[in-house]
Amino acid sequence: VRTTGAAPRYFDVTLSANGLTTLSAANVTIDRLTIATAGAGLQIDSGASLSSLINVNQLAGMVSVNGTLSSVGDYSLMGGALLGSGRVNAPFLTSVLGQIAPGSSTTIGTLTIGGNLILSSGNGLFINLGPNGSSDKLAVVANGTSTGSANLGGAVNFSPAAGYSIKAGDSYT
């Protein structure tokens, strides 16, 4: 029985209602995050961070990371979309039926995965192509004990960035 200090609290956050929850200009720590329904969304703005002490489960919905999303445990992307130009830190980010779009659906950006990445055969990776060889990037880097390795499956979909038309002779790396 605790007789001094603050009583322990457990913050299991589940987003299931339709709508977008935005985290801006804040650094927040929770125990677990679940995005549960197709209408639920989470946006982490540049300069903001969300840390989960257990894991992240995205069953559906949209998560836009332009700041930092970190998890001590794994990030399971079972469905829905992960996009943005920020960083996701987790030992493993595993996408089963998810859609990943660095930047946004129409703009170019780099989404960085700090840890290991597994994209299953049901995953969709959406890459925008722009002028002068510019394109979206999905960067996988080492983080802590994770080596930064990637196991890639699924489909890669290419489309022009907003306002650009792909031309014969364009080259992308």
Image: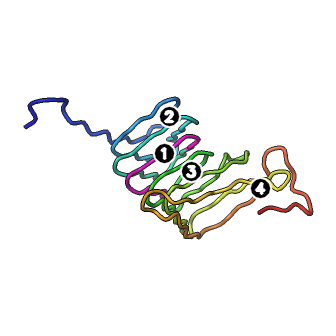
Q: Quadrant of the N terminus?
A: top left
Q: Quick one: quadrant of the C terminus?
A: bottom right
Please name the residue shown 78% across and 54% down the image.
Answer: 129
Tell me which secondary structure the magenta stretch mostly adopts.
strand
Indicate the amino acid at tag 1: Leu
* CA separation in Å, label 1 and label 2: 14 Å
Q: Amino acid at mark 2?
A: Thr
Q: Which residue is mark 3?
A: 82
Q: Circle 3 sits in a helix, a strand or a loop, which is it? A: strand
Q: Quadrant of residue 145?
A: bottom left
Q: Residue at x 33, y 42 (%)?
A: 12
Whole-angstrom CA distance, mark 2 to mark 3, is 14 Å
Q: Nearer the viewer, mark 4 or mark 1?
A: 1
Q: Which residue is mark 2?
A: 21
Q: Secondary structure at mark 2?
A: strand
Residue type for callout 4: Ser
Q: Position of residue 85 (x, y in %)?
A: 63, 45
- Is the residue under label 4 in contact with that under label 3 (CB below 8 Å)? no
Q: Residue at x 59, y 70 (%)?
A: 153
Q: Which mark is residue 69?
A: 1
Q: Is residue 66 magenta?
A: yes
